Amino acid sequence: MNTLSNLYPQFEILLVDDEIPFLRSTLLSFERHGFTNLVSCSQPENVPALMQNNQHSIGLILLDLTMPKVSGKDLLIWLNEEYPDVCVIILSGINQLETAVECVKLGAFDYFVKTSDPSEILEGLKRAIRTQELSIENQALRRKVLSNDLSTPEAFANFITADANMWSIFQYLESIATTRHPVLIMGESGAGKELIAQATHRLSQRSGQLITINVAGLDDNIFADTLFGHSKGAFTGADKDRSGLIEKANQGTLFLDEIGDLSASSQVKLLRLLQEGEYYPLGSDKPKRSQARIIVATHQNLEKRQSEGKFRKDLYYRLKIHMVSIPPLRDRVSDLPILIEHFIQQACKEMKIDTLQYDKSLAYQLADYPFPGNTRELKSLLFDAVSRSKDGVLNKSALQSLFVNENPLQQQEPTAVFPNSSKLPTLSALADQLVEEAMRRSNNNQSIASQMLGISQPALSKRLKNMKR
């Protein structure tokens, strides 16, 4: 029995043809080529009932043109009106250009003559599946953006963030959760690329495991052997068959980190895997079909590398179907207060000491530091600071060199000078000026601005709302 994770595609393919022998042979041919989510119908008058049946999720139909009772043309017109999101391919015994053009005008995705080369029909089917998958994913993404909520927030439990851009990424990942297309994760070192891969795998609900490998520095032979495995006798010392990581990730996810460093010959092998869903173990002439979802990540600019001839253009465009770009920590300083709190508590727990007290202006002091190592660097710095601490107070000496902003609590209190001839501002007006200045200095970061003013963030937010009235 097929489970959701090994069905291909995720939606059902319906074959409609009154010629039962052709129907059976076509089903067998499709199954041999890895298509498992198939439904057949030899009575075209039953198609409306099948489409309305809640037990079916039909996304693609292969429709014979010439049938008794109900013609394929009539069904095509009805499907285009009632189910415009369903993709229809016409299969016909008639090789006439006028008929093909008419069917396309009526809404057909493609048109094939039954006597055509079977490989052409299979390629047409794959194109239709890819188009339909992208259409379904785009619809899911639009719904997700409009809802502005996360359906599975538990999948992102390892992320400590309140940044709007990060939440947009989470929504996007939910919308592409079940796709078989690869996902390209872009981001600087330490930004959380592996966390994104883990969340994507959890969201997919695939039955297999997540297998991770860093491909930087792997030559072509090691890359092929690691991913695809080898058969006995493939090379000296290969005394038995060995499965590759792609097979270990069966029904799961294979995460290839630092994909930008992949050699040219290895890029060709990866491209074939993505295009055909097949691979050859070293020393074998029998292809194996991959049931693993591919996620790749890099800190490099792949668009620049492909323009320089260092990364295949066709592989780049295949990978960027679904792309996530993680913003660096310096672009989401609003996360600094909660990350500092989290890492200090985590360090104290791991070192089995009581939670340390620390200056709440620490986030403000670090706000202008660029954090080239991103969240990973911040974690290391704070763990080091906790290990140096005594008397229940965080030792900030190791962080001192990173402070671009001075501690506002240690600054000399500013003295307001009002000429005798000028009118004194009211307390309310002066408070508004202080709030505006704090927001300016903190780049409109309410969390940091509230620390500068010595008030809570909710209080600052309320005051800002009152100022806009």
Image (spheres, grey):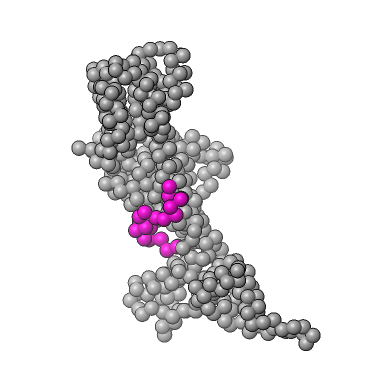
Q: Find residue 128 and report its horizontal and vertical position in percent.
A: 40, 30
Q: Residue at x 43, y 72 (%)?
A: 341
Q: Is any atom of residue 226 visible in this view?
A: no
Magenta stretch contains residue 160: yes
Q: Nearer the viewer, residue 160 or 90?
A: 90
Residue at the farthest right position: 421
Q: Find residue 163 and report its horizontal and vertical position in percent.
A: 49, 61
Q: Find residue 13 and report its horizontal and vertical position in percent.
A: 31, 30
For the C terminus, the quadrant is: bottom right
In magenta, the rendered stretch is: 143-161
Q: Residue 154 is drawn in which quadrant?
A: bottom left
Q: Is any atom of residue 132 visible in this view?
A: yes
For the N terminus, the quadrant is: top left
Q: Residue at x 34, y 28 (%)?
A: 61
Q: Residue at x 51, y 58 (%)?
A: 328
When the figure is inspected, residue 295 is found, relative to residue 355, above or below; the finding is above
Counting labels gives 0
Q: Nearer the viewer, residue 331 or 277?
A: 331
Q: Nearer the viewer, residue 32 or 81?
A: 81
Would residue 171 appear left or right of 252 to someone viewing this image?
right
When the figure is inspected, residue 231 is found, relative to residue 443, above or below; the finding is above
